[in-house]
Image: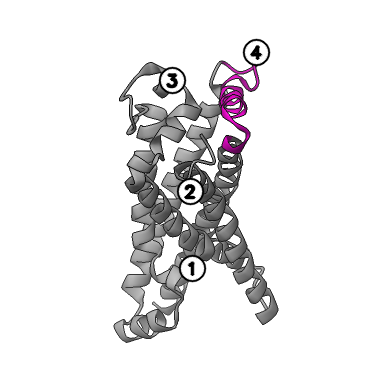
Amino acid sequence: MATTTLIKGARSTRSTIALKLLMAASGIVFILFVLVHMYGNLKAFSGELAYNEYAEHLRTFGEPYLPYGGLLWILRVVLLGSLVAHVGSAVALSMRAHAQRPVKYAVKKNKASSLSSRTMRWGAVALLLFVVWHLLQFTIVKINVGAGGQAAEVTENPFRLLTAAFQPEQWWMVVIYLLAMLALAFHLHHGTFSAIQTLGFTNTAESRARARVAGWVVAIVVAGGFSLVPLFTVFGVIS
């Protein structure tokens, strides 16, 4: 009986480690993606021509070996798979932790945890909803919330669609975007630290401190970089 229990415990531990590694790996995929995506967004500071050329280059990249838009479809498949892996492993780990952790211990842990770790669950839900809207607005449907409605000269022009979304009349869009970036910053801060910890690079107090700094650097660079475009657009710098 004791042997059976030990075997089950060892299997549970191995599967938990596997889930954490899967969550870390998929999280790293998302970190790399948002860094590249942020770089692309900052092309807006170079003007309409540069931004639209960048958007078109993403669709023609790899031709003739890849079909038109082939790179984007590869990215979508990778990101969708990473999303399923990330959310699935997070849910599985949360259920295991909830089943094994005493209530009093959970309360004490929450008191000692950081704000970013306590907001991971709801922040993730908010980010998922924002991503759905973001895809509808700029990729799938191409929704122009600004003046001109669904005029083709706006919806089929990536730069104009972007700038139309963040005009002073659409100040609420800027607020939504900035709140989403705040949620992203918290998620990246804790997620980066957790990924580094899962990969075994936080064995000392110094390495844990460096991991926390790395989390803040990634969070500030990515969320701050994304926030520059709506802010500079609503104030008329990007137009």
Marks 3 and 1, Cα distance to the nearest angstrom? 51 Å
The 10 Å Cα crowd at callout 2, few under 14, some 14 to 19, many 20 or more, is some
Where residue 41 sits: x, y (%)?
A: 55, 39
Question: For the residues carrying marks 4 and 3, which lies nearer the camera in this image?
Answer: 3
Marks 1 and 4, Cα distance to the nearest angstrom? 47 Å
Where does label 1 land, which residue? 13
What is the span of residues highlighted in magenta in the rendered image?
44-67
Mark 3 lies on a secondary structure that is loop
**Residue at the spot 39% in from the left edge and 47% down from the top edge:** 174
Question: For the residues carrying marks 4 and 2, which lies nearer the camera in this image?
Answer: 2
Where residue 202 sits: x, y (%)?
A: 64, 72
Mark 4 lies on a secondary structure that is loop
Marks 2 and 1, the one that precedes in the sequence: 1
Marks 1 and 4, the one that precedes in the sequence: 1
Labelled disc at residue 156 = 3
Where does label 4 land, which residue? 64
Q: Closest to the observer: 28 or 105? A: 28
Marks 2 and 1, Cα distance to the nearest angstrom? 46 Å
In terms of secondary structure, what is the magenta stretch mainly?
A: helix
Q: Amino acid at mark 1?
A: Thr
Left or right: where 16 falls relative to 28: left
**Residue at the spot 41% in from the left edge and 33% down from the top edge:** 164
Marks 4 and 3, the one that precedes in the sequence: 4
**Residue at the spot 36% in from the left edge and 58% down from the top edge:** 91
The 10 Å Cα crowd at callout 4, few under 14, some 14 to 19, many 20 or more, is few
The 10 Å Cα crowd at callout 1, few under 14, some 14 to 19, many 20 or more, is few
In this rendering, is residue 182 above or below 50?
Answer: below
Where residue 225 sits: x, y (%)?
A: 57, 50
Q: Amino acid at mark 4?
A: Pro
